[in-house]
Image (spheres, coloured by chain):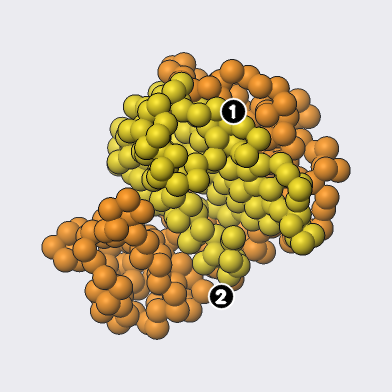
């Protein structure tokens, strides 16, 4: 199911009376909701959930109407996206293709990633973020290649291998389409759904 | 192929903002269960308008976000002894992970000093660093995908 959304438009947030734009959103929202869009909180979990009720905690549940009304106003309206020809599959970023590496050793350095991943193509961008408390590598890296083929090759050859004696996973970062998520009671409980990239995703909401 | 933990719901939303001379300035992002990452940054300072971006991230990205959250152990904390939001500002962190749903609110945290002098330094410290780590992750994703400087 393609997620077709227009390019950015100018807008004034205050004038945005629209409900959350899920109405145009592939499969992420219930067709039964229509114009009667519940609060985002309950839209995600309560009310539509077919799983056990959640244990809740925190002052945010005090139900401050003004805070919630403001949140709905902030989250409604149009958000910019990059043009896409519809899903499924990985999505190209504005100048290249971005992959996510996880399981990165905490002492890894950018050079280690350059050495391992540079053979598939020129690395246009590399983000190896640090844990803000410890100063060690947080555990993930984002790598950008110019071409799809380079990125795909990096994924195929590096996923499941070891970097600095620690196993890493490598996959695409961005997708053209939403996950196949069972958000609706109408789907009658949990079901196996085929997600992007041919994997079986099984998420129940 | 289904992994018990990965099949649980995951949702995360973070907001920080205040209202002042330059209007309602805020930063907000959310990871939705269907993979949509939404990012918004608003300021009327020097008549800036709002930045609003959204993109679908892959299950790999959601899984890493979950890991960051669960490593922090924020789900064990509680905000009842944290400073309440005030005129200086407000932070909100809402996370659904498995069968737990937290929704914490607190004031802005200027520095570690604010954390250390609070009534719950341990918990607030966890929040403080988690928020920074999440921002790093989201800013990297957004800036790489859209080639903008998100802040």
Residue under mark 2: which chain is it in? A
Q: Indicate left or right for A12 with A107 as reference.
A: right
Say which residue appears at 56% left-offset and 20% top-offset. A61
Say which residue appears at 59% left-offset and 60% top-offset. B151
Residue labelled with disc 2: A95
SS assignment at label 1: helix
SS assignment at label 2: loop
On whether disc 1 and disc 2 are found on a single subunit, the reply is: yes
Label 2 crowding class (10 Å Cα cut-off): few <14, some 14-19, many 20+?
Answer: some
Residue B10 in the image: x percent, y percent?
Answer: 45, 36
Residue under mark 1: which chain is it in? A
In the displayed structure, would residue A58 be above or below residue A152? above
Mark pair 1, 2: CA separation: 35 Å
Residue labelled with disc 1: A41
In the displayed structure, would residue B134 be above or below residue B33? below
Dot placed on the residue nearer the N-terminal end, 1 or 2: 1
- Which quadrant of the figure has residue B74? top left
Of residues B34 and B72, the one nearer the viewer is B72
Q: Residue furthest left?
A: A165
Q: Nearer the viewer, mark 1 or mark 2?
A: 1
Label 1 crowding class (10 Å Cα cut-off): few <14, some 14-19, many 20+?
Answer: some
Residue A42 in the image: x percent, y percent?
Answer: 60, 24
In the displayed structure, would residue A205 be above or below residue A28? above
- Chain that is yellow in the image: B
- Which quadrant of the figure has residue A9? bottom right
**Residue B4 badge:** none
- Quadrant location of the N terminus of chain B in the rendered image: top left
In the displayed structure, would residue B13 be above or below residue A10? above
Say which residue appears at 74% left-offset and 57% top-offset. B45
Residue A29 in the image: x percent, y percent?
Answer: 63, 35
Of residues B2 and A17, the one nearer the viewer is A17
- Chain that is orange in the image: A
């Amino acid at each position: 199911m393609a997620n077709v959304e227009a390019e950015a438009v100018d807008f004034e947030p205050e004038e945005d009376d629209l409900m959350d734009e899920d109405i145009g959103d592939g499969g992420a929202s219930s067709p039964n909701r229509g114009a009667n869009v519940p609060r985002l909180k309950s839209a995600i979990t309560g009310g539509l959930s077919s799983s056990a009720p959640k244990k809740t905690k925190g002052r945010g549940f005090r139900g401050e109407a003004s805070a919630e009304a403001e949140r709905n106003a902030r989250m409604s309206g149009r958000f910019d996206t990059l043009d896409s020809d519809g899903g499924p599959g990985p999505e190209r970023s504005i100048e290249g293709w971005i992959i996510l590496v996880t399981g990165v050793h905490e002492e890894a350095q950018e050079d280690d990633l350059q050495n391992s991943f540079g053979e598939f193509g020129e690395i246009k961008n590399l983000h190896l973020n640090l844990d803000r408390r410890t100063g060690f590598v947080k555990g993930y890296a984002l790598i950008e290649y110019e071409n799809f083929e380079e990125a795909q090759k990096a994924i195929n050859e590096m996923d499941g291998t070891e970097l600095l004696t620690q196993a890493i996973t490598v996959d695409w970062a961005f997708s053209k389409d939403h996950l196949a998520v069972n958000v609706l009671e109408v789907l009658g409980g949990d079901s196996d759904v085929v997600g992007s990239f041919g994997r079986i995703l099984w998420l129940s909401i | 192929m289904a992994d018990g933990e990965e099949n649980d719901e995951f949702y995360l939303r973070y907001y920080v903002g205040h209202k002042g001379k330059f209007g309602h300035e805020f930063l907000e992002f959310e990871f939705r269960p269907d993979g949509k990452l939404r990012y918004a940054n608003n300021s009327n300072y020097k008549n800036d308008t709002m930045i609003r971006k959204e993109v679908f991230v892959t299950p790999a990205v959601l899984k890493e976000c979950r890991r960051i959250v669960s490593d922090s152990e924020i789900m064990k904390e509680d905000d009842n002894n944290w400073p309440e939001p005030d005129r200086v500002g407000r932070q909100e962190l809402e996370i659904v992970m498995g069968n737990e749903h937290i929704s914490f609110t607190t004031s802005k945290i200027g520095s570690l000093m604010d954390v250390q002098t609070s009534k719950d330094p341990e918990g607030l410290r966890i929040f403080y660093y988690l928020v920074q780590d999440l921002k790093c992750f989201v800013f990297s994703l957004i800036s790489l995908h859209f080639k903008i400087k998100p802040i």
